[in-house]
Each structure stands twice: as structure tokens, then as C-alpha cells.
Amino acid sequence: MKRRGGCLTIFLLFVFVIVALNIENYFFSHIEGAIAGAAAGIGFAFGSLNLIWGALDTKSKDWVYRKVEDAGDWLVDKVADTGKSIGKASKGTWQSVTSFFGGGQQAYD
């Protein structure tokens, strides 16, 4: 009798896990769809406002877009400069380490 009850418990646990996973997948797939729909609605609203703004006042829109583009260019330049600095520092460190060990020549002699 105990053995049968143990099997029944394992079976019910297995069924519970399967049902719980299906509920979770159903729930999260609907949330993801709602988020995607909300994002599409927000994008549509901003696009509409951008279109109206361009039709009403092109000079201010062009000025703002120019400023945003300049800020993006500045940011790209700073990231590139930082990358170059990191590259130079790592190259110098590597040369210091290899010169300390004789440039690795002992390994090949």
C-alpha cells in the first residue's frame, strides 16, 4: 500500500509541476505581448508627435536634432579615446611583464 501511495505522490507531483509550468508560460506570454503592445503604442505616439512638431516648427526640431547628434558624436569620441587609453595601458603592462621574464626567450632556448 505504501509503495502505491509513493508512486501516486510522485505522479501527482509530476502533474502539478507540468500544470504549473504551463500556467507560467501562459501568464508570461501574455505579459510579454502586453509589453510589446504598449511599446508599439508609445512608439506610435512619439512618432506622431515628432511628425506634428516637424510640420509646425521645423527650425526648433532641426536645432534639437543637431544638438542630439552633436552629443552622440561627443559620446562616441570619448568612448573611442577611452578604448585607446585602455589599449595603450594594457600594451605597456604586457611589455613590462614580458620584459621582466626576459621576453619569454628562456622558454624557447
Image (cartoon, rainbow, N blue to C red):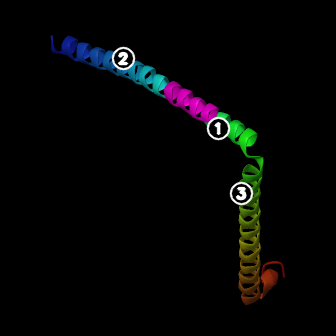
Magenta segment, prevailing SS (helix, strand or loop): helix
Quadrant (top left, top right, bottom left, bottom right) of the C terminus: bottom right
Q: CA distance from mark 3 to mark 1?
A: 17 Å
Q: Residue at x 39, y 20 (%)?
A: 23
- Which of the 4 image quarters holds residue 39? top right
Near mark 3 (Cα within 10 A), the count class, few <14, some 14-19 or many ≥20, is few
Label 2 is placed on what type of residue? Val
For label 1, the crowd category at 10 Å Cα-Cα, with few meaning under 14, some 14 to 19 and many 20 or more, is: few
Could you say where residue 1 lies in the image, as x and y percent from the top left?
15, 10
Residue for badge 3: 68
x, y percent for residue 102? 78, 88
Near-viewer residue (87 or 109):
87
| Residue 58 falls within the magenta-colored stretch | no
Asked whether 4 or 20 is in front, the reply is 20
| Label ID, residue 19 | 2
x, y percent for residue 14: 34, 19
Measured as percent of width and height from the top left, residue 31 is found at 46, 27
Q: Which residue is mark 1?
A: 49
Give whichever of discs 2 and 1 has the lower sequence position: 2
